[in-house]
């Protein structure tokens, strides 16, 4: 591994200043489960690595604040998957967090890191999209709250501006009942990177949100406001037509080793239908 | 029967060190002053090396050596267990993605890594072949220089060897039904959790080498020859490997590391990354065309098998794999006419080598799957057709060869019973049952020495490699059984060619039988000495003294071994030593150079559920029954069989190399090469052993540990066919492949 | 404030012993445990956080030490396999031996630590919970069933 300067600021302003000074030559280190791999294989060669784990504002935390559930940037997947409030109000997010890698990975990997790494296959992205999460970013110009829909550009790239640091992910507290589930396709039952991820949420007003990933450069959110998907009695053909529209933006890469495009597109539909049934069922029991 | 005697399952010898982290694997051993080594390889498969500029690399502080072919004795020595085709380092040309072109040795890992990145190689990519079709094309570039086999008519092709086995007249045979299909088996790798590791150090006027090698004596010979040293000056240390499965049988980078040590005058250590291990060893992939002729009453009439194995750029032991693996390809059945043509085909890929099953799993997948198709064609139950044709004990099912050496029917019937073959099956589920056969060792030589020390404790010196199969424990149990010492008073010494007597190799599931018998012989020699001692002490005729299981039986009483030993050794003390030698000579007239000492036989039965929408296969129940003769340590037998079954599920469901069009492996490493985790097990896994004490090993044992892998794919494929109606002929049965096969199935 | 890359001072408590050492910032916790502290129980295998051979317990949780920079572990408490037993084997280690969960042994340090942490968190795990809890520890010898048996046996024994 190439060496680098290692900084571990304790103040957020310090971290921002470092990022401002070094720009793309600096990389943030939270859980390390993505970055350390890149440092070792040479795909990341920063001059400075900024360890954010000692910054007070980014300490692991899950708290309710101003109508939101706020997940601090340092919060790891293990704690998100186990948190009662997450499991109650955002079960799909808990389910997603529970399948990011293995126990060892989940004990280090942060939600903020998963989001900023911006892999199209990020397990947590679909649930965050369905629940209209916001990325709280602090930079030289102050604090922004960036809606997650639109945050992902392509693999490894987000709309974060230079010198912005994500300090939290916010989830609006639900104002209506919703049933939601996270599903995915993998090559084995043991821990794996997903070849398709999907979250389906059906709310009490009949709106169905489907977010999916690993079938294109970024995760996609698609919404059905017609009420047809949410209606358990609607004919299958009608639902299929809507699914076709919702999945129209899927463009899986033919270069992927994990699955071929036609398999992924077919599995989108299979997962969509299965997730919809589960979401409707969860809404009914909510 | 004491808790440590034969047939009991005492805890693994060496187990305590493993659970405390004290066990030293090769990469855990540090020598003072050791230099860290790194390899330099190219980002392509086959290339002509135009120039190598190491000047910048040599300037990195701490670098002590950058060595290429030019720095070795000329011509660069070559080695290999079958053909001496592999140069110590690439000479003028790389032949596979990952073949090293230079080695760097430095004071620290960081310096070695930095320097390796600064070795500038100018190269020209050359046309290369990575598939059977490409390699067999008449216009294909040749992998091996024809000059290496000048009298071989195949030298102008990429076919290394053709192996023809057969009997009867297939072409004249008439069968009611003929079923013909082609099957493929993927390229997979061993993925031992311990990557290969090597270390060498000058040792006086000789050299000491540490390696994860499974065959220390064989490595010693290779090194002696390549380095021009007598065997007595080459000491090989072989710490227990962290998994071998065949991938660590033969020399790979030890010669290179040895030269580096001699050049620098310092110890040099090379620990491969997991990615480099994937590039060091793999199993041969295979395409098999099978024509099975069967009559309506279920009798097999003929098997006509053509198997092309895609081996790598250097032969390693791959051609032996092809010859020996294809030999019993017609299966453990009485088949009147058989024709097998197996070819080892060279390619610009990772050298394939031995891997648990040794060429048998590939043909088993094809022949057992095809037998199922034949059964369906005549409307016969797939268990019934196997029982109908299965060789009975003593049948010369391969003419002029070792006859069937077990009551194989027993294993089949037991497996069928455990899977509930004749019971109703839930909708959406399917069942498959397959049998597997593998020839045991055809030649062998295992020396051992047993020392009964003055206090009754025992040292066993046996050159087998214990890579997890539990050889240490088995040999200790034999010593305990025969000499009466408690198990924890027995020390087993392995893995040091300077003090452990010669053992040919650890492979072909031979060690319990060959080395076990050798240790038994050595113990019996000590027993004879004890008998003589007791006779002398008590004024008896030796013929009236019997030493058995640690007890000295005199006509009028019994004495303990320790009692006789102590009095017999007297004031000067001392010890008794016994030697064992088990030798199985080669038979040049036999196609395999010898008939096998035993067969491994297994029956695997599987119940599976297929999710037709996604292609997921869930193995609801997996039953494996092996014919083992005698389980000297039943728990270890179970562990080996279950481990083999799980490993077999790997190539069945998820493992395969993915090459790109330039012959580079895309899925090196653990992220995109998937092996079974604890969550990927069958919902129920049952293993049983048939013990008829009819093996040639100690107490009637046979070799085992490969059997339970042989027919896993066949049984699972059969279950999938049963559940879905679709026969899939290519492995692995990934969800995507299954989905695609179901999607593309012809509509009725 | 940037630290020098060459020699970064850290303090760790490893298996109950306080250690003050200097590390290179680009060296992982695995590197430092094996090469600087001589604790070779944690193994090198995949180095990408997939196989679990390098598992250690860091501040009460299992981690792949190949993905943790040593510098990040400053101030932490680390338990390696060498710290599981004193003069006698821990019940979990004994159970691994008794149930035949050890073949080549290379994955075993990681398995033991994952099992140890699992039982600390969940003293009465179900079989699926054990399988999932240990899914991050690959065993190519295929001892999974024996390993889970050993964990179940340890849990049952603790209950009695």
Image (cartoon, rainbow, N blue to C red):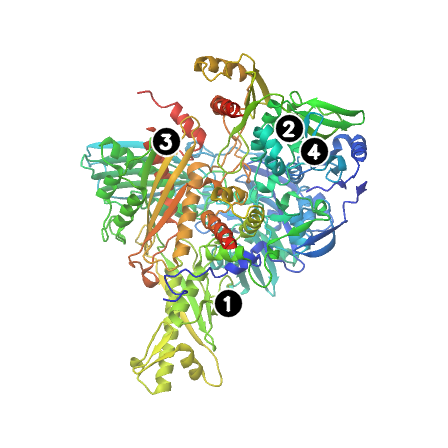
Asked if disc 1 and disc 2 are in contact, CB closer than 8 Å, the reply is no
Asked if disc 3 and disc 2 are in contact, CB closer than 8 Å, the reply is no
Q: Which residue is mark 4?
A: A72
Q: Which residue is mark 2?
A: A118
The residue marked by circle 1 belongs to what chain? Answer: B
Q: Badge 4 local density, few (<14 within 10 Å), some, or many (20+)?
A: many
Judge by depth and name the residue closer to the eye, A82 or B471.
Answer: A82
Q: Which residue is mark 1?
A: B499
* Same subunit, tags 1 and 2: no
* Same subunit, tags 4 and 3: no
Left or right: where does residue B138 sit relative to residue C28? left
Q: Badge 2 local density, few (<14 within 10 Å), some, or many (20+)?
A: many
Position of residue A99 measured from the top left corner of the image (x, y, whole percent)? 56, 35
Say above or below: A100 vs B481.
above
Q: Earlier in the sequence, mark 2 or mark 4?
A: 4
* Same subunit, tags 1 and 3: yes
């Amino acid at each position: 591994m190439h060496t680098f300067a290692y900084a571990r600021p304790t103040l957020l302003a310090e971290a921002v200043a470092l990022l401002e000074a070094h720009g793309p030559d600096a990389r943030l280190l939270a859980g390390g489960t993505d970055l350390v791999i890149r440092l070792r294989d040479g795909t990341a060669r920063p001059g400075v690595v900024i360890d954010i784990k000692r910054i007070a504002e980014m300490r692991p935390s899950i708290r309710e604040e101003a109508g939101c559930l706020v997940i601090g940037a340092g919060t790891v997947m293990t704690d998100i998957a186990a948190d009662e409030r997450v499991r109650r109000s955002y079960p799909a997010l808990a389910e997603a967090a529970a399948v990011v890698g293995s126990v060892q990975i989940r004990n280090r990997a942060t939600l903020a890191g998963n989001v900023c790494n911006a892999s199209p296959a990020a397990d947590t992205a679909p649930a965050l999209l369905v629940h209209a999460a916001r990325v709280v970013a602090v930079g030289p110009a102050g604090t922004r709250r960036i809606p997650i829909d639109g945050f992902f550009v392509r693999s490894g790239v987000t709309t974060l501006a230079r010198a912005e640091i994500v300090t939290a992910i916010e989830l609006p507290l639900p104002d209506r009942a919703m049933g939601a589930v996270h599903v995915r396709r993998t090559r084995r039952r043991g821990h794996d990177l997903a070849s398709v991820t999907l979250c389906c949420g059906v709310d009490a007003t009949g709106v169905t949100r489907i977010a999916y990933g690993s079938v294109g450069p970024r995760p996609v959110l698609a919404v059905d406001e017609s009420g047809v998907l949410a209606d358990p009695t609607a004919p299958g053909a009608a639902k299929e037509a809507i699914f076709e529209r919702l999945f129209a933006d899927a463009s899986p890469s033919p270069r992927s080793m994990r699955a071929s495009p036609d398999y992924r597109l077919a599995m989108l539909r299979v997962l969509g239908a299965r997730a919809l049934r589960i979401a409707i069922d969860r809404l009914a029991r909510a | 029967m004491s808790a440590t005697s034969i047939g009991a399952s005492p805890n693994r010898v060496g187990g305590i060190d493993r659970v405390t982290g004290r066990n030293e694997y090769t990469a855990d051993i540090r020598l003072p002053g050791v230099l860290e080594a790194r390899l330099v390889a190219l980002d392509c498969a086959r290339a002509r090396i135009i120039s190598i500029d190491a000047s910048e690399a040599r300037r990195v502080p701490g670098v002590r050596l950058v060595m290429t072919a030019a720095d070795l004795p000329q011509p660069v020595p070559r080695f290999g267990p079958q053909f001496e085709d592999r140069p110590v380092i690439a000479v003028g040309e790389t032949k596979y993605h990952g073949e090293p072109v230079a080695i760097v040795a430095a004071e620290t890992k960081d310096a070695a890594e930095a320097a390796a990145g600064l070795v500038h190689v100018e190269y020209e990519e050359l046309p290369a072949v990575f598939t059977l079709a490409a390699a067999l094309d008449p216009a294909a570039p040749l992998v091996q220089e024809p000059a290496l086999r000048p009298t071989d008519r195949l030298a102008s092709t990429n076919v290394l060897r053709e192996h023809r086995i057969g009997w009867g007249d297939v072409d004249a045979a008439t069968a009611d039904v003929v079923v013909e299909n082609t099957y493929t088996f993927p390229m997979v790798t061993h993925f031992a959790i311990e990557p290969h590791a090597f270390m060498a150090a000058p040792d006086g006027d000789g050299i000491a080498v540490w390696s994860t090698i499974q065959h220390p004596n064989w490595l010693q010979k290779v090194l002696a020859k390549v380095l021009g040293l007598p065997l007595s000056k080459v000491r090989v240390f072989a710490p227990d490997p962290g998994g071998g499965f065949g991938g660590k049988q033969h020399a790979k980078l030890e010669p290179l590391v040895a030269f580096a040590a001699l050049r620098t005058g310092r110890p040099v250590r090379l620990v491969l990354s997991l990615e480099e291990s994937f590039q060091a060893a793999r199993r041969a992939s295979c395409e098999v065309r099978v024509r099975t002729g069967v009559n309506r009453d279920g009798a097999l009439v003929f098997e006509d098998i053509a198997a092309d194995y895609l081996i790598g750029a250097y032969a390693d032991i791959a051609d032996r794999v092809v010859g020996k693996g294809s030999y019993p390809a017609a299966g453990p059945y009485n088949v009147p006419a058989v024709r097998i043509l197996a070819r080892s085909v060279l390619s610009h890929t990772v050298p394939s080598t031995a891997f648990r099953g040794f060429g048998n799993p590939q043909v088993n997948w094809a022949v057992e799957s095809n037998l199922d198709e034949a059964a369906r064609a005549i409307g016969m139950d797939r268990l019934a057709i196997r029982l109908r044709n299965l060789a009975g004990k003593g049948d010369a099912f391969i003419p002029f060869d070792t006859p069937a050496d077990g009551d194989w029917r027993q294993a089949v019937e037991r497996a069928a019973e455990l899977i509930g073959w004749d019971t109703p099956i839930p909708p959406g589920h399917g069942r498959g049952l397959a049998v597997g056969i593998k020839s045991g060792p055809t030649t062998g030589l295992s020396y051992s020495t047993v020392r009964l020390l003055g206090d009754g404790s025992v040292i066993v010196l046996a050159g087998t490699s214990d890579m997890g199969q539990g050889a240490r424990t088995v040999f200790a149990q034999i010593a305990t059984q025969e000499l009466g010492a408690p198990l924890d008073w027995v020390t087993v010494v392995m893995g040091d060619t300077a003090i452990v007597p010669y053992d040919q190799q650890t492979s072909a599931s031979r060690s319990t039988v060959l080395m076990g018998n050798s240790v038994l012989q050595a113990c019996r020699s000590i027993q004879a000495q004890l008998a003589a001692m007791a006779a002398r002490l008590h004024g008896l005729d030796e013929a009236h003294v019997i030493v058995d299981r640690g007890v000295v039986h005199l006509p009028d009483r019994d004495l303990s071994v320790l009692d006789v030993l102590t009095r017999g050794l007297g004031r000067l003390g001392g010890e008794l030593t016994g030697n064992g030698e088990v030798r199985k000579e080669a038979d040049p007239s036999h196609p395999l150079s010898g008939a096998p000492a035993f067969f491994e036989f297994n029956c695997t039965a599987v119940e599976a559920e297929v999710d037709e929408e996604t292609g997921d296969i869930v193995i609801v129940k997996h039953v494996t029954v092996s014919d083992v003769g005698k389980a000297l340590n039943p728990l270890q037998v179970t562990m080996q069989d279950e481990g083999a079954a799980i490993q077999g599920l790997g190539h069945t469901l998820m493992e395969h190399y993915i090459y790109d069009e330039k012959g580079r492996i895309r899925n090196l490493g653990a992220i995109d090469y998937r092996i079974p985790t604890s969550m990927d097990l069958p919902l129920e896994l049952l293993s049983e052993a048939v013990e008829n004490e009819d093996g040639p090993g100690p107490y009637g044992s046979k070799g085992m540990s490969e059997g339970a892998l042989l027919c896993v794919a066949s049984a699972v494929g059969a279950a999938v066919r049963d559940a879905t109606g679709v026969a899939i002929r290519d492995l692995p049965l990934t969800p995507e492949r299954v989905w695609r096969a179901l999607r593309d199935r012809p509509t009725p | 404030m940037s630290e020098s890359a060459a020699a970064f001072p850290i303090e760790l408590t490893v298996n109950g012993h306080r250690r003050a050492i200097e590390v290179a910032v680009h060296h992982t916790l695995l590197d430092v445990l094996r090469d600087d502290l001589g604790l070779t129980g944690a193994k090198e295998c995949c180095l990408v956080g997939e196989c679990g051979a390098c598992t250690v317990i860091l501040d009460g949780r299992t981690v792949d030490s190949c993905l943790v920079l040593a510098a990040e572990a400053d101030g932490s408490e680390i338990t390696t396999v060498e710290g599981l037993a004193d003069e006698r084997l821990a019940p979990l280690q004994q159970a691994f031996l008794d149930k035949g969960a050890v073949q080549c042994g290379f994955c075993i340090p990681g398995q033991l630590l994952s099992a140890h942490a699992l039982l600390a968190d969940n003293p009465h795990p179900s079989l699926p919970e054990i399988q999932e809890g240990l899914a991050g520890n690959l065993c190519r010898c295929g001892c999974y069933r024996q390993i889970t048996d050993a964990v179940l046996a340890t849990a049952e024994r603790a209950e009695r």
